[in-house]
Amino acid sequence: MMRNAHDEARELIAQGDGLSSVQQALLRAHLDECEACLHYAEAAAQLVRSLRSLPVVADSRLVRATQMRVKARTRELQQRQERLVLVSLSCALVAISSALTTPLIWQGFEWLGRWSRVPSPMWQVGFVLFWIAPTIAASLMFLAHGTYLSGNRSTSEFRG
Amino acid sequence: MNAMESEASAIARGLRQHDPDLLDRLIEQHQHRLLRYLVYLSGNRELAEDLFQETWIRVLERGHQFDGKHEFSTWLYAVARNLTIDYLRKKSPVSLDGLMEDEEHAPLEPIDTGPMAWEVVQQHEQAERIGAALVSIPAEYRETVVLRFQEGLALQEISVVTGAPVGTVKSRLYRGLNMLMSRLKGAQA
């Protein structure tokens, strides 16, 4: 469908301020000649003035409640950050101590195997079990804890 | 770097550090504009107040995503808009147009006008008429009209907030204003 000069002028009017000088000149020229579009422009201007004066305000109770919630969440995020630093530090320490102690424990198991005259595969299996048992126990604990937390979080979402 | 850019960069820095004083100041500075946008976007004052709080929580949590290249308010409206759409999708899978369904049940309530002087009553009635006309037009037009004429955003900024091309924003403004005018005429007749 072809757009006529009236539609173009009204689209420019609907954009409000911020028109380029060329657009302003075009619009002014059209409004000088077209009474209907001039009325439209006046009605639009009146409507925009009314829209700007619509009284929707936030009350101080809402603002204070929001500020308090944001502060509480900030503290939670900071605590989480601190915990993350502690966990990272612990992981680093564990990795270093593992690197240092693994060869020593391996030698200890080897000596124990020779002393008790058990075949090599047996003390090697014993070493692997000794080595991964704490990891498996810790993983199970974390898994159980994580499942509990996610179960609790789903019930408290969008509260408050 | 101009004043707007340096202010936006300072806000971006503060948001990355979760600066509580900055957030307090931003909440106070944008309280009325954000709430007004949410009231007209959702068509429900109570829901808008909930979304207002959730918007600031999201600003805190995702503050690192604000790059400081745009006005903070543009990003804030985009956060509020996405949150509103997410919330309504969770409630029931609807588009922005679906907001209209809720509006029938929970009409907009303009604030209490205080003393009942004749001028105040007239202003109140006028505000009620315009508020009712505004919530009666489809949400995508209403949102564009509110962002342009109440919040004073430029067409480009509205395009950033809504994710619609500038041409679409222009056409929504034109059609939105026309719908508003015809509804107000209808209400007066």
Image: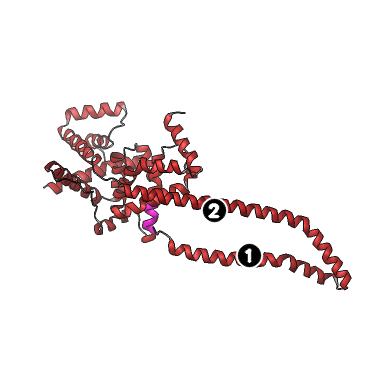
Q: Are marks 2 and 1 on the same chain?
A: yes
Classify 10 Å Cα crowding around label 1: few (below 14), some (14-19), many (20 and above): few
Q: Which dot marks residue A139? A: 1
Q: Which dot marks residue B21? A: none
For numbered disc 1, what is the local secondary structure? helix
Is B140 inside the magenta-drawn segment? no
Chain on which label 2 sits: A
Characterize the magenta stretch by its predominant secondary structure: helix
Q: Earlier in the sequence, mark 2 or mark 1?
A: 2
Q: Label 1 amino acid? A: Ser
Range covered by the magenta-colored residues: B81-89
Q: Please say if the residues under marks 2 and 1 sit with CB atoms less than 8 Å apart.
A: no
Residue B70 image offset from top left, x and y in percent? 43, 37
Say whether residue B82 is visible: no
Query: Which one is in front, B152 or B20?
Result: B20
Q: Residue at x 28, y 58 (%)?
A: B102
Q: Residue at x 50, y 43 (%)?
A: B16
Residue B143 image offset from top left, x and y in percent? 31, 46
Query: Which one is in front, B82 or A15?
Result: B82
Say whether residue A114 is visible: yes
Report the residue marked by disc 2: A80
Which quadrant, please, contains the C terminus of chain A? bottom left
